[in-house]
Image (cartoon, rainbow, N blue to C red):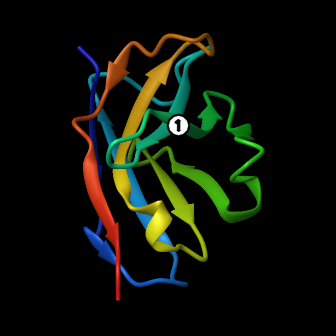
Amino acid sequence: QVQLQESGPGLVKPSQTLSLTCTVSGGSITTNYYYWSWIRQPPGKGLEWMGAIAYSGSTYYSPSLKSRTSISRDTSKNQFTLQLSSVTPEDTAVYYCASGDGGPRFYYWGKGTLVTVSS
């Protein structure tokens, strides 16, 4: 069973860079045809897909966040990371990592981590 666990600071100051890591167990992030995504949910709002890194290392980003988002991976640690720059209070959300086959469904989810942007 694949398990995902998000980790990182719960509080980030405005204008700084938010950085989160997703550690994967029970499966490899290089497994063919799997895509590893970051998704967030602001308080009282719906889920927003932010971007993904593919099994090949290729990256894909939401057009609305592309200028501020970077996703990378460390295959030796079976981890992938999210960096979101120039954050504002509107970036406050529960951040999830998830995996799927590139379709609309995600097979595995982390539990999510709340990140608050505040001075």
- Placement of the N terminus among the 4 image quadrants: top left
Residue sitting at x 78%, y 44%? 63
| Rendered image quadrant of residue 56 | top right
Residue 116, compared with residue 112, is above or below; it is: below
The spot of residue 14 in percent (x, y) is 47, 83
The residue carrying mark 1 is: 48
Image position of 90 with respect to 33: above or below? below
Graded by Cα atoms within 10 Å as few (under 14), some (14 to 19) or many (20 or more), the crowding at tag 1 reads some
- Residue drawn at (35%, 80%), measured in percent from left and top? 118
| Residue in front for this viewpoint, 119 or 60 | 119
Q: Nearer the viewer, residue 33 or 45?
A: 45
Q: Where is residue 51 in the image (x, y as percent from the top left)?
A: 62, 40
Is 4 placed left or right of 50 in the picture? left
Residue under the point 72% across and 38% down: 60
* Three-letter amino acid code at the position of disc 1: Glu
- Residue 62 located left or right of residue 47: right
